[in-house]
């Protein structure tokens, strides 16, 4: 009976206090596992004191008045000699309201109310399973952002090139998951981002993820950003090999430039193959043969190594050495004398001369050829003669170059 009467009094007092708390309540946030001290305003700093602490938290069913003498609650909260309340190690269950009512030496009453919230800073968020490349036009998983061990739950958000990335049901989708540790009560958040990159857009987008704690005035935590490449879909077989001079025939000592054209993003690594064997050269889209020697002759191709595809090989080109006329070199030396326009004019004339000469040779050859076709029986002999001449030429060239160095 007495207890119930007392409870009735408390209800009345509480409702009065409640009204006061709405005005004078103070929000306190405390880190989980750390001590927290709440001061009892208006209380004398030393005993004897007239004060009372009570609390309503996750550990209590209703208001619990703490005995100034201490007891089983000491490990959770105890009243210090100066009247303050000490929570030696704050836990999630300590979230709630704490109140103190004190009377000073002159009998004036002061009430203090604290709303205690607790928090735990999670580890730095991390993007796990990051995509190394994205294919435009189709949904791609970019990665999963994970924040572990935070309280309260907080939120994860994604950014693309510094701008917030919101799920829009079209190109951007986010799948979130929140788990709670059964013992510690701490949260693990996961956010999996899926995007459909535009066919034309940034080739190296930066995705970042940040954790915003569910507390006011607290700083966000940022995961290390990731930069997947956006790959252009490469239809197979379009690696091209461009050879300069065109046709791949070059005078002895001349230079040949082979350029591999593999239109892909990111630029694939280009390796070179000669006569079916891979050349041990650092990857490069250009292969320069500065002074072509007989051993440089052969069949060349390039192989593009893509991060997302099978390697692609270009069609092969063959490089061969042919002897040129002296006239071509003479024209070159005139051009090199530095007489400007005159040299150019002379060069042009020389060029025209060569062109005319060549035309003459071709016409003459064709006539001879046509003549040959008419007299078939004799041609066999002629061809054999020609073959003999050609064969005698080859060792000569080989001999001259091996004697050179
Ligand atoms: C304390 O927190 C509550 C909500 O949690 C808020 O409405 C109130 O304005 C806060 N009071 C102060 C003094 O910050
Ligand atoms: C009472 O003592 C504690 C611990 O020594 C201290 O943290 C707190 O500030 C004191 N309270 C007041 C009102 O001085």
Image: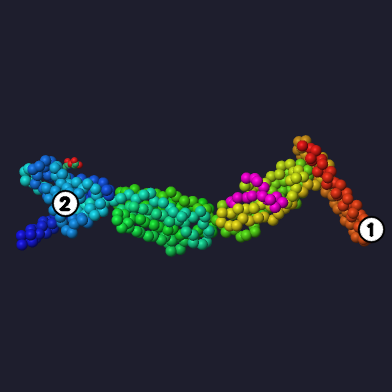
Q: Which mark is residue 265?
A: none
Magenta region? 267-282
Mark 2–mark 1 Cα distance, whole angstroms, equals: 124 Å
Q: Name the residue beneath numbered marker 1.
A: 378
Q: Nearer the viewer, residue 326 or 266?
A: 266
- 312 on left or right of 231: right
Q: Position of residue 194 (x, y in %)?
A: 46, 59
Circle 2: element type: helix
Q: Is mark 2 within 8 Å of ligand 2?
A: no
- 116 on left or right of 158: left
Q: Name the residue beneath numbered marker 2.
A: 72
Q: Position of residue 53 (x, y in %)?
A: 14, 50
Q: Position of residue 160 (x, y in %)?
A: 45, 53
Q: Nearer the viewer, residue 311 or 284?
A: 311
Residue found 34% across the figure and 59% down from its top: 179
Pointer 1: residues within 10 angstroms few (<14), some, or many (20+)?
few
Residue found 60% across the figure and 57% down from its top: 310
Give the farthest residue toward the front: 72
Pointer 2: residues within 10 angstroms few (<14), some, or many (20+)?
few
Residue found 49% across the figure and 55% down from its top: 131
Is-magenta flag for residue 48?
Answer: no
């Amino acid at each position: 009976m007495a207890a119930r009467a007392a409870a009735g009094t408390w209800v009345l007092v509480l409702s009065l206090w409640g009204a006061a708390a709405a005005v004078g309540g103070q929000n306190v946030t405390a880190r989980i596992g750390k001590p927290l001290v709440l001061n009892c305003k208006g209380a004398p700093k030393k005993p004897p004191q007239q004060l009372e602490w009570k609390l309503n938290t996750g550990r209590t069913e209703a208001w619990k008045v703490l005995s100034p003498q201490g007891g089983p609650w000491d490990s959770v909260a105890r009243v210090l000699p100066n009247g303050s309340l000490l929570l030696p190690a704050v836990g999630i269950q300590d979230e709630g309201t704490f109140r103190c009512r004190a009377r000073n030496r002159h009998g004036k009453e002061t009430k203090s109310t604290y709303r205690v919230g607790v928090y735990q800073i999670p580890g730095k968020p991390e993007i796990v399973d990051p995509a190394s490349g994205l294919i435009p036009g189709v949904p791609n998983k970019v990665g999963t952002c994970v924040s572990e061990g935070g309280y309260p739950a907080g939120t994860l958000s994604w950014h693309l090139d510094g701008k917030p990335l919101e799920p829009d049901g079209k190109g951007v989708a986010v799948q979130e998951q929140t788990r709670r540790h059964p013992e510690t009560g701490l949260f693990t958040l996961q956010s999996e981002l899926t995007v459909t990159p535009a066919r034309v857009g940034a080739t190296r987008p930066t995705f970042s993820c940040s954790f915003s704690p569910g507390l006011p005035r607290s700083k966000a935590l940022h995961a290390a950003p990731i930069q997947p490449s956006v790959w252009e879909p490469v239809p197979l077989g379009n690696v091209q090999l461009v050879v300069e001079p065109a046709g791949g025939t070059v005078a002895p000592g001349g230079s040949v430039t082979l350029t591999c054209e593999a239109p892909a993003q990111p630029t694939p690594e280009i390796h070179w193959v000669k006569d079916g064997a891979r050349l041990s050269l650092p990857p490069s889209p250009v292969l320069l043969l500065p002074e072509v020697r007989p051993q440089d002759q052969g069949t060349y191709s390039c192989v593009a190594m893509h991060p997302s595809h099978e390697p692609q090989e270009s069609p092969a080109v063959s490089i061969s050495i042919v002897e040129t006329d002296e006239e071509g070199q003479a024209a070159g030396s005139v051009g090199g004398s530095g007489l400007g326009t005159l040299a150019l004019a002379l060069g042009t004339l020389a060029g025209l001369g060569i062109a005319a000469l060549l035309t003459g040779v071709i016409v003459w050859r064709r006539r001879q050829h046509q003549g040959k076709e008419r007299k078939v029986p004799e041609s066999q002999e002629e061809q054999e003669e020609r073959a003999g001449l050609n064969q005698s030429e080859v060792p000569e060239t080989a001999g001259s170059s091996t004697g050179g160095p």
